[in-house]
Image: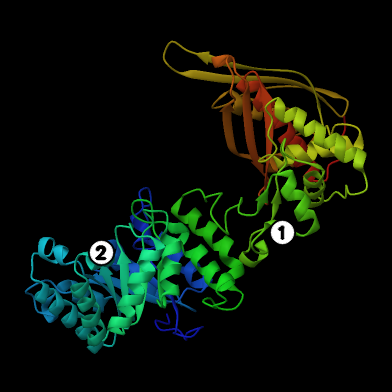
Amino acid sequence: MTDVPEPALSDAFHVFDTTLRDGAQREGINLTVADKLTIARHLDDFGVGFIEGGWPGANPRDTEFFERARAEIDFRHARLVAFGATRKAGVRVEDDPQVAALLESQAPVVTLVAKSHVRHVELALRTTPEENLAMVRDTVAHLRAQGRRVFLDCEHFFDGYALDPAYAKQVVRTASEAGADVVVLCDTNGGMLPAQVAAVVRTVLADTGARLGIHAQDDTGCAVANTLAAVDAGATHVQCTANGYGERVGNSNLFPVVAALELKYGRQVLPAGKLAETTRISHAIAEVVNLTPSTHQPYVGVSAFAHKAGLHASAIKVDPDLYQHIDPALVGNSMRMLVSDMAGRASIELKGKELGFDLSGDRELVGRVVERVKERELAGYTYEAADASFELLLREEAEGRPLRYFRVESWRAIVEDRPDGTHANEATVKLWAKGERLVATAEGNGPVHALDRALRVALERIYPQLAELELVDYKVRILEGRLGTGSITRVLVSTGDGQSEWSTVGVAENVIAASWQALDDAYAYGLMRAGVEPQE
């Protein structure tokens, strides 16, 4: 392993990621050592300058991570960082076991957390302000003497500055004079606003001359803005987490910060070409932590460049830049046109183009599709998240007939509640395909699963391509109405073939009938993708 890689960029500006430590404090995230190693590889591939791996010595998992990272990861862009605290009050730094653990991690960089809020010094550390300064000075100097690069996080800095600015600045001076490369001002409670952050950073920079960084929590929803405000005021080190993961509501989100720095500030903070990996890395890390990627996250969400209003579509048809602040490809994302009852002709034309249809010369066809979409959405359908069903509708209007691979004679689903408390779900389908009548019965975990299995039993002999299809997601929504349990039900089904996924929609008075419609579309679309010619 290369502990100290050749820097890809100048050391004048740092992108520092703390997903593996601060991000892991998010409720619902529980990272194994293998998870942490995988995320570290993703972050290094993205090109961040520093990856904070955790607190060696504080728990066996973080200690193991540093041991395995040394042996298993050849960092190409990032330096691995160990996190820890200054020596304990009244203890010689050479005798402090947690300081020794930082050295034993063999990480080339150490981030120390220190108190900069005088009340925290007195109440949490139970020591004097003078001893706290000595703790900072001794620990930084000791680690520097051992060849480590040191950053110091001033915990609760902004709140401490509001209470006693002179003492907060003295902590910064002490760390810098002892050899800390960067002193990071932490908005630990996340309560600051951008103008406040900028004013404090500007003053502290002028009064101390230290190199400053920023660590912002998102409790006011301003973590990204606060981070950029600190950069405006002179900070040259930003601490972030992937997708904004972190304690309470989270931390400053790495991906919007980096995208803003590169695309809005014109400051290269990643190796050349890496910004286009933003969306992929964001989603890959979300998979590792087992959280669904946020659809509306700036830059990387699937809705970040999605357009629904007809007015927007008309402008985008002329020039995409009219309603997009950047080219989505710059961050590895793409523009999407959403089809809904708000759609006009331009929306349908652009969506058709996205699906491979040139509709620009057929106003009559476009008009029919617009009207049909509005009519069906009035009945409860939605095509925003059901591109496959929309494409089937579009093909039906364009070709004058439905795309059908089988004809339904009847189907039924039975749910049996037995006296012993167990349940049985059985479905029977009667179909016609390629001139042959097919009857099949199957059981499943629920009535919809039973229907899906019965369809497969009936059709896979004629259409072996169906063996590749898999139901990957299933959503039910009861639409607004006055009928209670008799209200209209909408079902969205996501299906995959191992290479891609598509979504289909069904609407009916009951969940089983709506599910059948969605499954019917899912099978038809899957067979169409496989190149099978329609038979019915």
Q: Residue at x 8, y 75 (%)?
A: 91
The answer for how far apart the CA atoms under marks 2 and 1 are is 42 Å
User: Which residue corresponds to the image point at 86% horizontal and 40% vertical from the top-left?
Assistant: 366
Q: Crowding near pointer 1: few (<14 within 10 Å), some, many (20+)?
A: some
In the rendered structure, find residue 156 and report the number of the disc placed on it.
Answer: 2
Q: Please, what secondary structure does the residue beneath circle 2 have? A: loop
Q: Is residue 72 visible?
A: no
Q: Quadrant of residue 475?
A: top right
**Three-letter amino acid code of the residue under disc 1:** Leu
**Percent x, y for residue 376?**
74, 28
Q: Which mark is residue 47?
A: none
Query: What residue is rendered at 22% in x and 66% in y?
Result: 160
Front-most of 61 and 44?
Answer: 44
Residue tagged by mark 1? 322
| Disc 1, SS | helix
Q: How is the image coloured?
A: rainbow
Residue 400 drawn at (x, y percent): 91, 33
Left/right of residue 365 with respect to residue 220 in the rendered view: right
Between circles 2 and 1, the one closer to the viewer is: 1
